[in-house]
Image (cartoon, helix red, strand yellow):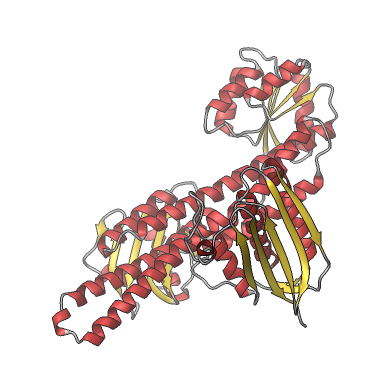
Amino acid sequence: MPTQKPLVLVADDEQNAVMLLKHIFERDGFEVESAENGVLALEKARELRPDLILMDVQMPKMSGFEVTERLREQPETERIPVIFVTAAAREPSDVAHGFQLGADDYVRKPYDYHELLARAHSKMRARQLEDRLQRRSDELEALVRIGGEFNQRLGLDELTELIVDITCDQLEAEHVELYLLDEQGGPVSYQDSLQGKHEQLDRAKAVLLRKDTIINRVFVSREPILVRVEDDVYLQDINQGIGMAAPLKHHGEVLGILFAAHGGSSEFGESNFRMLRSIGEQAALAVRNAQLHAALQSYAQNLENMVEQRTQELRAAQDQLVQTEKLAALGRLAAGVAHEVNNPLQPVLTCLEGAIEDVENEAPVDLESLRVAESEVQRIKSIVSRLLDFARPSTSDTVPVQIRPLVEEVIILTKKQLERARVNIDANLREVPMVKGSPTQLKQVLLNLVLNAMESMPEGGVVSVGIHIEGNGAAIEIADTGEGMDEHTISQIFEPFYSTKDDGTGLGLSVSYGIIQGHGGNIRVESEPGVGSKFTVWLPYFHN
């Protein structure tokens, strides 16, 4: 399928200027629309939602300044990049006024078209990156909320209705169905967004067994599927244009199937498909908890007829499974959101702020900073993928890792944040043999420890980072001159959900401890109140 060309809107009342810009951008692979006055430019921006607007300042009916101000007032147009291409705004006050109204850049006439194209691509890439990060952040926030709502419902009837309603709202689907299955794969419950719950399960059973339908394919393959009407007889039967379905799997067992469809002109995209799969995974955990709760209620009504041993076994099973699955659903997701995404997101924002300052000051953009930002975005992508697949076992590969470059990268990523907090960094980094591990996970641990050290020094201080050989492995020391901890606090800091911060989740050090244990290493801590703390991460050497 061919990639859609980016759309540029040229707002200028001089036809020669429009023709020149149209020629430049069409030759570079853009679609170009034009508007000869400010009112028409505003109308076309709202209708076409272009990827970029090249705006003249002085135009009939409405100036470029006024158009930009109106665009920034509307949610549907507030994020469209605007570059003023003008000969009129030469005074610094005019330029400042334009930026205050929401302009992204200025290019003065006469201009070099290579520079203009470079600035246009830079602004669109920056805005696309912001949009992608915002969408992923919105998805993660929605999943946290959904997980919390699911795990508050222990009644199956209430839960199935909630699953269908949330799927409809989150995916903007016209039609949603939920099939709950027994151990033999037969339907035990069927919920329809259009007709509610069906007591008669014959239709649900027929749909499950009917060949060449999306429901049957997911039932057989046990994997999520997205299809269009021409490839599926069931979509034709219910008059829907596109549909997708995902299994509700719990430890390899399929507890049900979640189906969503709509018949409009819009299509389900990758983010919709990913969201359906994630809803299905969380719904599976909630359904299993509800089933266990229902089973326990049934047993509770007949406690007088049960022997003591059986009662104790059931209680132990309930405590273990309900609590374990709630922690698996909410704990992993919360840990990923709070401690994996936020760490790489900060250097991305810092690098982008630096790049924007360079462009505003007409200085060369620091390419290395943008590469660091791109690397961190890729890491966020990897983290998000793990979070959305949190119910599945980790498949992270380990490779030989050089410790010193990895620590140096962490120092670079945190440098500006430490400077803002008035924290100096003292590095003593020796070359040591390679260790075996995941660079992404190890970087996550070190970022967490450095930022924790910074937060322990609200009035500023020094973070010391060192590398040395210890036995048959490498030791990384991160020390601070902060508030320190007493013995009671030290004994609990690696426990899940224990935090010394008012707004902390208590998962950062717990997650870091688990990562290092998974690498065959350990984390030690030494601390004294009023003096500071030192964390030592030890990792075994890599052996062929």
Residue 281 visible in the snapshot: no
Indicate the quadrant containing the C terminus: top left, top right, bottom left or bottom right: bottom right
Q: Residue 38 vs residue 427: left or right? A: left
Q: Residue 501 vs residue 344: left or right? A: left
Q: Residue 52 vs residue 111: left or right? A: left
**Quick one: which residue is furthest to the top in this view?**
61
Of the pair 511 and 215, the residue shown nearer to us: 511
Indicate the quadrant containing the N terminus: top left, top right, bottom left or bottom right: bottom right
Q: Residue 247 vs residue 407: left or right? A: left
Residue 254 visible in the snapshot: yes
How far across and how far down the image is residue 459, in percent?
63, 42
Picture quarter containing residue 64? Answer: top right
Q: Is residue 521 above or below residue 140?
A: below
How far across and how far down the image is residue 61, in percent?
61, 12
How far across and how far down the image is residue 497, in percent?
47, 61
The residue at 55%/51% (across/down) is: 136
The residue at 63%/51% (across/down) is: 482
